[in-house]
Image: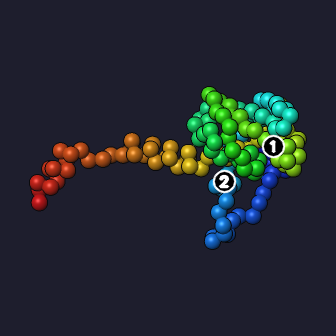
Amino acid sequence: MANYKNEVHIEPAMAMGDRFEGHIVQGHIDAIGTITDIKNLGNSYDVFIKVDKKHIGFIVPKGSITIDGVSLTVNDVNADTCRLTIIPHTMKETLFKNYKKGTQVNVETDMFARYVSHIIKHQTQTDSLSWGEVDAINASF
């Protein structure tokens, strides 16, 4: 876990029955990322975070990502880096104001990407019966 001696953002969990808005995040740490670049674009900042390749598949463009507890939308993803665009308010009011190149951060990847990947992985690795086996079982009755 990165930043265990520093600050992270924590919000109370949504209560059952509350109005749902925004990103679905769980507060899990899936990976440790490293900030590789921060570009000031004037009215926003592009933050580039390198993530281990085994986790990059769970980071999807326009999907959700959480960095040290701050829930954000992913702008772009390449082989091992994602790009986030941070508005000035978020930069000022969160830990992002303290980040610099080389800072390690806690990353929660997109929950839906993790679920879909898990389902597909297990569908392709099941020991399903062949149609011949199904016919043989039916013929035995």
Disc number at residue 23?
2
Disc number at residue 87?
1
Residue 109 picture location, percent across and down: 64, 45
Q: Residues within 10 Å of mark 2 (few under 14, many from 20)?
A: some
Q: In the image, 68: left or right of 42? A: left
Count of numbered badges drawn on the protein: 2
Disc number at residue 27?
none
Residue 37 picture location, percent across and down: 79, 29
Secondary structure of residue under mark 1: loop
Q: Using the image as rendered, state which of residue 46 and residue 80 is in the foreground.
A: 46
Label 1 sits on what residue type? Ile
Extreme-bottom residue of the structure: 17
Q: Are marks 2 and 1 in contact (CB under 8 Å)?
A: no
Between the C-alphas of marks 2 and 1, the distance is: 17 Å
Q: Residue at x 77, y 29 (%)?
A: 36
Q: Quadrant of the C terminus?
A: bottom left
Q: Quadrant of residue 13?
A: bottom right
Q: Quadrant of residue 84?
A: top right
Q: Is residue 140 depicted above or below 52 in this figure?
A: below
Secondary structure of residue under mark 2: loop
Extreme-front residue of the structure: 43
N-term mark: 2 or 1: 2
